[in-house]
Image: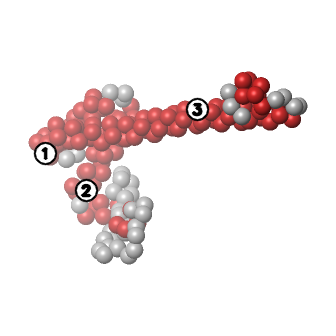
Amino acid sequence: YKLSELFIELTGEPKLELEVTVLNVNEGHNREIMSRSETLKEYSAFVDVVRHYRNESEDLEQAMKQALGYCITHGILPEYLKEHGSEVISMLTLEWNTEDAKVVWREEGRQEGLQQGLQQGVQQGVQQGLQQGIAQARSIGIPEDTIVKIFGHN
């Protein structure tokens, strides 16, 4: 990936470019790389366990605690998780909550857009109906002063 590709609008050529290779370190991918780093392999297993417990539980914090306990018990990053477990839970809870919040924000935005669209549509419909009524009144010869009295303007 190139850093410049992550910007929606880029004016001119970038002054500095960063190019990185992204590797999939999820469970079951890039086995050769995983075989060279026990920590990376355990991290991958940890993420897989977290996803498993998160999918099984409605209570986010409880799911994270269960995943942490499982990993410590089964030798997945045990020393690190014993020492930094509460920080890991805080970080993961924030990350998952952010993802959940994004879903809610998108839905709220969609609902707001629909509401605004409906209001605009009603306003346009009323305006068109008014214009058609005035035009029809004129076409059958109703005097302008009567049209103003009926429709409020000409």
Report whether 125 appears left or right of 58.
right
- Type of the residue with mark 3: Gln
Quarter holding the N terminus is bottom left
Q: How is the image coloured?
A: secondary structure
Q: Is residue 135 visible?
A: yes
- Type of the residue with mark 1: Glu
Q: Earlier in the sequence, mark 1 or mark 3?
A: 1
Under circle 3, the secondary element is helix
Q: Is residue 71 visible?
A: no
- CB under 8 Å between discs 2 and 1: no
Q: Which mark is residue 40?
A: 2
| Mark 2, other Cα within 10 Å: few <14 / some 14–19 / many ≥20 | some
Residue 8 rendering spot, x and y as whole percentages: 43, 61
Write down the residue under mark 3. 119
Residue 24 rendering spot, x and y as whole percentages: 37, 59
Q: Earlier in the sequence, mark 2 or mark 1?
A: 2
Q: Real-space Cα distance between discs 2 and 3?
A: 54 Å
Report whether 16 appears left or right of 109.
left
- Type of the residue with mark 2: Leu
Q: Real-space Cα distance between discs 2 and 1?
A: 14 Å
Q: Quadrant of residue 35?
A: bottom left
Nearest to the observer: residue 6 or residue 87: 6
Nearest to the observer: residue 1 or residue 113: 113
